[in-house]
Amino acid sequence: MKYGSQATALPLFIYPVFILFCLILCNIALRKLWSILFLSPGELLTIYVMQVISSSLAAYGMLQDLFAVIVHPYRFASPENEWKNLFFHHIPPNFTVSLPDVLIGYYQGGDTFYQLSHVLSWIPPFMTWSAFTLILLLMMHFLNALFRQQWIQYERLAFPIIQLPVTMVQSPHFFSNRMMWLSFGIVAILDVLNGLHVLFPAVPHLQLKLTNISQYFTENPWNLIGTTRVSFYPFMIGIGFFLPLDLSFSCWFFFLFRQLSRVFSGYIGIHHLPGFPYFHEQSAGAWICLALIALWLTRKHLVVAFKFAWSDKNGTNINSPMSYRTAFLGLIGCSLFLLGFGSHAGMSVTAILLFFGIYFAIAIAITRLRAEFGAPHGIFNHPLDMMVTTFGSKSWGGKNLTVMSFLFWFNRGYRPHPMPNQFEALKIADTIGIKNRRLLLAMIVAGLLSLVCAFWSNLDMMYRDGALAKVTGFRAWVGRGAFTKLEKWLLYPVSSDWLRISFMGIGSLLTLVLLVLRIRFVWWPLHPAGYSLAVSFAIDYFWFPFFISWSLKSIILKTRGIRGYQQAVPFFLGLILGDFVVGSLWMVFGILAQQHVYMIFI
């Protein structure tokens, strides 16, 4: 948090992998020296899963953004922006802290959280947002329990993201594989050199992170290509190797297509239209379509699950995390809580149903995408934006808009989304032989503990170092993004934007057409998920690593076949592990030395 690390902005979290690596090394020593403390594969992966769940909550994109949003209005209100008159009377008092004396130390530092006035002021928002977040997590668990059998056992989705942690624990030859250590060593040397270069600029380095190449396109219409960055992230080359070829190809293909469409729009003279070609709206339509496709493909199983839930056979499957009846009743209970939460805050029933309906639709689409392909999913389609685009800000009123702006923190980017991490844990349980119900309990415990720890660590750090003083990882612009829009909607109300709605429909239609073509023609190379990821800017940092991994995987499969692919797997796992381990060691050094160090991402 303090130095702005974005280790949880990736589909595979950096630090849980590093800690698992350290535990495995300790485990090897314990087997020889103190066998009573030796951890089984199931125990190791249970610890790993608990860390992943905890990280997904405490992450940038979840609770870190909560602290950037909920107190933002009271710090940055001014006579010029008129926030106090515009929407302060709509803010539920239990959402935030408004006392100036309490917030001065929060932003400026040099204070301590451990004062009675500070602690008492933060208890209401802590209770409110902890309960709200816990219900969101439980609702995701209930949804995953309904999808689990269809996606894991019947469709046997690939789950590329779990390959590294499972292989580290399960394969007896992983740490003796020369190919793994070769790639690990290459990446380690590069990361050490790059880290030393940050501390001592005279040390030579190799640029692996983002390089903007759009600066070289200076002539019209090529100068309209927009920001185009090339990277050589070793960990993403490794992750990309485990993506299906059609998806990795589609990702970089549609990224280039997106950039060239800007050039083409300039060439024909329509680039001056505000927002054209409306990628944000295309992305919204594409992700909603992916959610509907996921539900449609699972419809028969959901019908069977519903019938089974109310039959005498309910609960006989001991390997399920819970019975179907519990899952359906849990969904009803969580939905009633969200309805009550929103109503108490001042939202209308229509706004509550639509807002959370969109949020969980995108959550289902992301979970399906991660389970099937493991691709990154940094998408920026907020339910409130979609609602205003479709119905206008006039339709919702100041109270709805204000409350939903305070909910901006958990649906801004979706990168550390808890639901796919929860679902991958169920796959890990099936692979290793852990009892799903015990792992579910471990995940719930991890969620409860991390809620408390995340609140404490954020508040302790903010009052000591200051959110705007020394905590360079504090993202004030997240709160600014929420309330600047709210200010604009309240000052200048807008109606339905039919042009943008049309492009949302185009995004849905293109996704559906690409799916039909993929089903009808075996040779069709373009995957609808690649289009959705490209227009949502999820792969802007990673398109070139995907191109590299797609090229290497294609060559290996064509020249060496499946056997060659299997032999290459340890090498690409080593790319991920080496990058994560050395990157984590640099961050540990940075914490101990209290200074900025080399980060392997961004």
Image: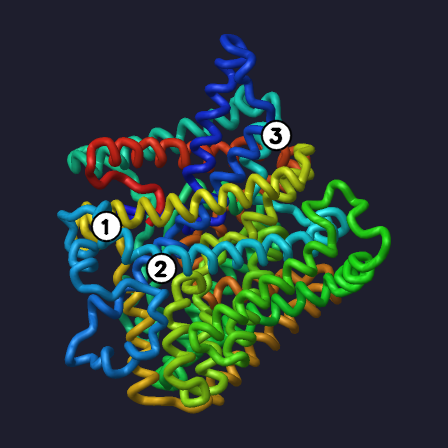
- The image shows a total of numbered marks equal to 3
**Residue 569 seen in render:** yes
Task: Between residue 331 and residue 211, name the one nearer to us.
Answer: 331
Which residue has dot 1 on it?
A: 116
Residue drawn at (32%, 64%) of the image: 96
Left or right: 211 with respect to 428?
A: left
Q: Quadrant of residue 402?
A: bottom left
At label 3, counting other C-alpha atoms closer than 10 Å, the crowd grade (few under 14, some 14-19, many 20 or more) is many
In front: label 3 or label 2: 2
Q: Earlier in the sequence, mark 2 or mark 1?
A: 1
Q: Residue furthest right?
A: 312
As drawn, the label of residue 42 is 3
- Confirm or deny contact between disc 1 and disc 3 (CB under 8 A): no
> Percent x, y for residue 163?
58, 38
Residue drawn at (24%, 31%) of the image: 592
Amino acid type, label 2: Pro
The image's colouring method is: rainbow
Left or right: 478 with respect to 110?
A: right
Q: Earlier in the sequence, mark 3 or mark 2?
A: 3
**Residue 558 seen in render:** no
Which residue has dot 2 on it?
A: 124
> Percent x, y for residue 492?
31, 89
Element class at badge 2: helix
Q: Earlier in the sequence, mark 1 or mark 3?
A: 3
Amino acid type, label 1: Leu
Q: Is residue 234 above or below residue 214?
A: above
Q: Quadrant of residue 225?
A: bottom left
At label 1, counting other C-alpha atoms closer than 10 Å, the crowd grade (few under 14, some 14-19, many 20 or more) is few
